[in-house]
Amino acid sequence: MSGPESADRNEDPTFPEEHEGGDLIGVEARGSPIYYDENAHSAFEARVDDGVRPGRANERQLGEDATVNDLIDDVRDRSGWDWLSERAKEYVPGAGSDGEDR
C-alpha cells in the first residue's frame, strides 16, 4: 500500500521499526508484524495484545541460502501482506516507495 495509510502505519507505535533485535519487514494480512533478525537469520512475529508485546512469537529460522526477499515471498504466498516497511522494500529488487506492497 502507499499513500496516507502507509504514512500512518509508519508512525504507529504498535509497529516499531526495531524490536528484540529484529527489523520490521511489514504487517502480514492477519495483522501480525513480521520482524527479521539479521544476526540470527530468523523471522518472528511481535503482535501486541492488551498493550503487551511478546518477545519473539512464532520465530523460525530461514534456510541457509534464504534471503529476506524469500521471506517476503513466503509470507505473501502463505497469508499475504497488509503493509511492507520502507526497510523491506530495500530488500526487494524493483520495489520502491511507489511500488506495490502485495
Image (cartoon, rainbow, N blue to C red):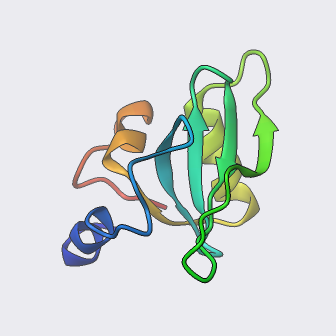
Image point (29%, 62%), residue name: 10
Image point (67%, 24%), residue name: 41
Residue 68, x across and y down, in percent = 57, 32
Q: In front here: 65 or 53? A: 53
Residue 36 placement, left or right of 96: right
Residue 21, x across and y down, in percent = 54, 34
Q: Check the image and name the residue furthest to the bottom.
A: 50
- Residue 93 appears in which quarter of the rendering? top left
- Residue 92 appears in which quarter of the rendering? top left
State the quadrant of the N terminus.
Answer: bottom left
Residue 89, x across and y down, in percent = 37, 42
Residue 13 placement, left or right of 31: left
Residue 67 placement, left or right of 60: left
Image point (60%, 71%), residue name: 52
Image point (57%, 42%), residue name: 20
Q: Check the image and name the residue furthest to the top.
A: 65
- Residue 100 appears in which quarter of the rendering? bottom left
Residue 64 placement, left or right of 72: right
One can see residue 53 in this view: yes
| Location of residue 4 with respect to 35 vertically, above or below | below
Q: In front here: 49 or 59? A: 49
